[in-house]
Amino acid sequence: MAGHHHQKLVLLDHPPQHVAIICDGNRRWAKKHGMSALLGHRKAIEDVFEPLVNRAADHGVKYLTFWVFSTENWSREHNEVEGLFGLFREFFGRQLDKIIEKGARVKAIGDISRLPPDVQEKIALAIKKSVNNSGITLVFAVNYGGRDELTRAVRHLARDVKAGKIDPSNGAVCPELIRQYLDTADIPDPDLIIRTSGEQRLSGFMPWQSQYAEFAFPKFYFPEFTPERLDQLLLDFDNRERRFGGN
């Protein structure tokens, strides 16, 4: 793998501002290689994230989102969920520090309050440490679900209406207002959403934000996601003509 980074970067005409990745297939990759599910997750966290972050930044991508834990993932075996949190503890501590030192800014979306307190703390610390960084913004969707996000947004909005902060009778409740209650209030909508492992569905990922996103459903599993594969997906994206609902 040495010297990998020095190959010529293909320049994109219009790099996407925000690329979001649904990290799917860790367990199937592990099974294919006769390993436990947890080793699939470990491979993803230790070998895949950082090179993808570096390459996306090289391409001029401003926001890179990884959906790493969904609100539905709690239903998996207790051992796997606990093991995942163990990996998060490592990743959001030591490994993410390296990425932050290079200038990346960290954000998180999802209902973080349900995660183990020490994992919440590590995420909060990474966000705080990197708040003034001006490099690529890394968004981690942790305990994220689209319906959950919209439900929390509506709850919060209803509270503000009840408190008299918003007058719903004068047309104040518009898409722009609703956007401000989403987890992504200060993050642009994704231009490109990639789901690895060949599944062709969003499973509740960013239902509001994905309105004009382009989709890519590569067949490879997330642990097999290399910088070269990202190059190819970004090139494919660059060649698409986007109409945003016009003509």
Image: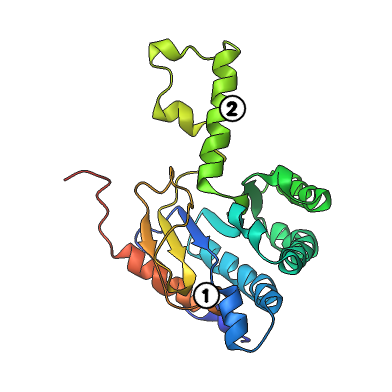
Q: Which residue is mark 2?
A: 156
Q: Which mark is residue 227?
A: 1
Q: Amino acid at mark 1?
A: Pro
Q: Residue furthest bottom?
A: 34
Dividing the picture into quarters, in which one does residue 165 lie?
A: top right
Residue 130 percent coordinates (x, y): 71, 49
Q: Amino acid at mark 2?
A: His
Viewer-side residue, 220 vs 81: 81
Of the image marks 1 and 2, the number of the one nearer the N terminus: 2
Residue 125 percent coordinates (x, y): 78, 48
- Label 2 Cα neighbours within 10 Å, binned few <14 / some 14-19 / many ≥20: some
Q: Residue at x 46, y 76 (%)?
A: 229
Q: Residue at x 69, y 46 (%)?
A: 112
> As drawn, is 201 to the left or to the right of 185?
left
Viewer-side residue, 31 vs 244: 31
- Secondary structure under the numbered disc 1 in the rendered image: helix
Residue 30 in sight: yes
Q: Residue at x 45, y 64 (%)?
A: 194
